[in-house]
Amino acid sequence: MAEQGSGKKTWIKACGIGCAVLVVIGIAGAVGVYLLAQKAMDAGAEAIAMQLEESYAAAKENGKVPEEHVALFDEIVEIATQDGASLWVTMTGTSAVLTSLEDGQVDEEETALATAIRDFIKANPSAGLAEFNAFAEQHPELQQKLQNIQSQLKPQP
């Protein structure tokens, strides 16, 4: 009978070790996926930041940035393109700049939204999805601007 009890203990020990190994593999896999996703988001932020800098420089060159708003948009571009800015901050800053300057006119509503975006990204340069969603809920007009900007950022063939 001592052998049967010993066999059960061995089986329970083996089962516990197997479960522990699966948990460790699961955690390692989750960390790996997180790191890959973070790397992809950082690369995306860098690509959008480069396009923002180019588009903003062209808008300034073509006289599409009203003189009274240059400082506001310069600050947004600076914050959105700085090293360490999150993908969400870069996208939000890009939407503020590109959609507001499309027609070379910046109305009061666009100025108010651009100012709110500048204040948000200045206070939260590494904002993630949760912070961005909370901000977007307070500014529903931002959703439409982001949809517009997505179509502008698609690579041209």
Image: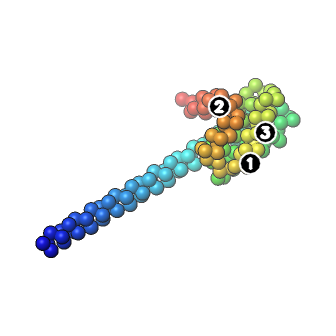
Residue under pointer 1: 122
The answer to which of marks 2 and 1 sits earlier in the sequence is: 1
* Element on which disc 2 rests: helix
For numbered disc 1, what is the local secondary structure? helix
Q: Residues within 10 Å of mark 1 (few under 14, many from 20)?
A: some
Dot 2 or dot 3: first in sequence order is: 3
Judging by the rendered image, the residue that carries numbered circle 2 is: 143
Question: In the rendering, which numbered label is found on residue 115?
Answer: 3
Disc 2 and disc 3 in contact, CB within 8 angstroms: no
Say whether residue 154 is left or right of residue 94: left
* Image colouring: rainbow
Q: Quadrant location of residue 8?
A: bottom left
Type of amino acid under label 3: Thr
In this rendering, does residue 64 appear at all?
no
Q: Mark 1 or mark 3, which has the lower sequence index? A: 3
> What amino acid is found at the position of numbered circle 2 in the picture?
Gln
Q: CA distance from mark 2 to mark 3?
A: 16 Å
- Above or below, 132 relative to 39: above
Residue at the image point whose x is 34% and y is 62% from the top: 20
Q: Residue furthest front?
A: 1
How crowded pointer 3 is (Cα within 10 Å; few <14, some 14-19, many 20+) is rated as some
Q: Vertical placement of 128 versus 100: above or below?
A: below
Q: Viewer-proximal residue, 44 or 33?
A: 33
Q: Position of residue 15 (x, y in %)?
A: 27, 62
Question: Can you give x and y, in whole percent of width and height, for residue 112 in the image?
Answer: 79, 34
Looking at the rendered structure, the secondary structure element under dot 3 is: helix
Residue at 76 percent across and 44 percent down: it is: 119
Query: Which mark, residue 29?
Result: none
138 or 70: nearer the eye?
A: 138
Residue drawn at point x = 32 percent, y = 60 percent: 19
